[in-house]
Amino acid sequence: MGLSGSEHEQSRRASPPPEDFLEIRKGGVVVWVRKGFSFLLEEDGTWRTDRAFSPADGASSPYSGRGKVLRVSLEPMGEKCAVVRHYRRGGIMGPFLRDYYFGRGRFLQEVRVSEWARGHGVPTAEVLAMRSERTGLGLHRGDLVTREIEGSEDMDRYLRALREKEGARLGRKKEVVRSVALLLQGMHRVGLYHADLNLKNIVIQMTEPGVNSHVIDLDRARVIQPLSSRLRIRNLVRLYRSLDKQGYLDGVIETRDLLGFIKAYCGEDRELLRLCKEVMRRDMLVLRYHRAGWRLSRGLRKIGGGDG
């Protein structure tokens, strides 16, 4: 994970999958599947299209993303469900490149980083399979299958429900804020830098004992040890911008919630607390630049016919 550029890409192509995975290669298809979950695939490496790999009970997914996210049955294992995410590009180039990538390195690396994160105590979804396919143009498309985090919802859905004043959630916002702060504190402590830390990539479980938080979608995530205070804060600022982008800073998330988050995240680290306050003040001006970028991106997506 310390390599970069062409050396990094070459290393990812040459090295084997993580220990608990099997590799299947069929023509331009490469599949990494966790041992015991090969039933997800046909012999030629394509996904099964029978009940083992179809939307479970016709239910809509509790997750959201750039493209379609499916919830599928794991019935052959006597278990419940998995979530299938199709890799799809975001940002300004998203409407044009859509789901095509130059190489399969990003797909492979997400599996590795996810396994590393789980091994270091970061609550994240367990990867069950990854499939990539080379197209006729030499580009690649991919899918990732993860075990469903049962009874969870992403933070965007949770905050939307708060805005609509849905009962049970109203009294637990303080718990949620603290749980997410401690999740990110632990993630950063072990050196995991999330490349796209936004509300849709944090999921929570509301249980009687307390709130459990998980971070998902580790596409382009990096392990940096030690992770500097400034990089940690940069990650937090990205989440803060996600709050602003979705309009939750207008009454749903209040100043006291932000202060409670920062206090829980920083703990006794006074220097980190000072840096957080400094960066947050400065970032109020930077938000204007990002708001302009969001408007441009939405306009391009409409022109390109991509997802909103």
Image (cartoon, helix red, strand yellow):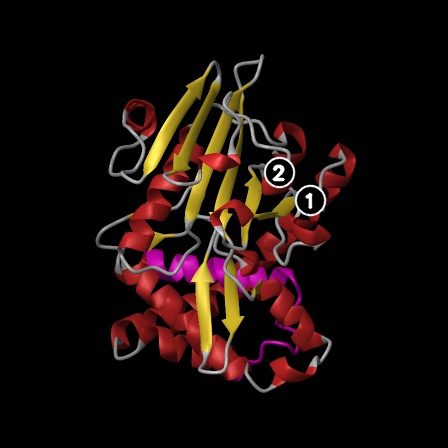
Note whether 35 is above or below 123 in the view shown: above
- From the top left corner, tell me how far across and down residue 13 is, in percent: 34, 23
The amino acid at mark 2 is Ile
The amino acid at mark 1 is Leu
Note whether 32 is above or below 60 in the view shown: above
- Looking at marks 1 and 2 on the same chain, the residue that comes earlier in the sequence is marked by 2
Residues at circles 1 and 2 in contact by the CB criterion of under 8 Å: yes
Q: Which mark is residue 48?
A: none
Crowd class of label 2 (few under 14; some 14 to 19; many from 20; radius 10 Å): some
Which residue does the numbered mark 2 point to in the structure image?
Answer: 92
Give SS at disc 2: loop
Quadrant housing residue 266 = bottom left
Q: Nearer the viewer, residue 51 or 21?
A: 51
Which residue does the numbered mark 1 point to in the structure image?
Answer: 296
- From the top left corner, tell me how far across and down residue 207 is, in percent: 50, 77
Question: Given the current orientation, which residue lies at the most extreme left position?
Answer: 226
For the record, the magenta segment spans 231-256
Please name the residue shown 59% across and 53% down the image. 290
Q: Is residue 306 visible?
A: yes
- From the top left corner, tell me how far across and down residue 181 is, in percent: 41, 71
Q: CA distance from mark 1 to mark 2?
A: 8 Å
Please name the residue shown 56% across and 31% down the image. 47
Q: Nearer the viewer, residue 205 or 300?
A: 205
Q: Nearer the viewer, residue 92 or 15?
A: 15
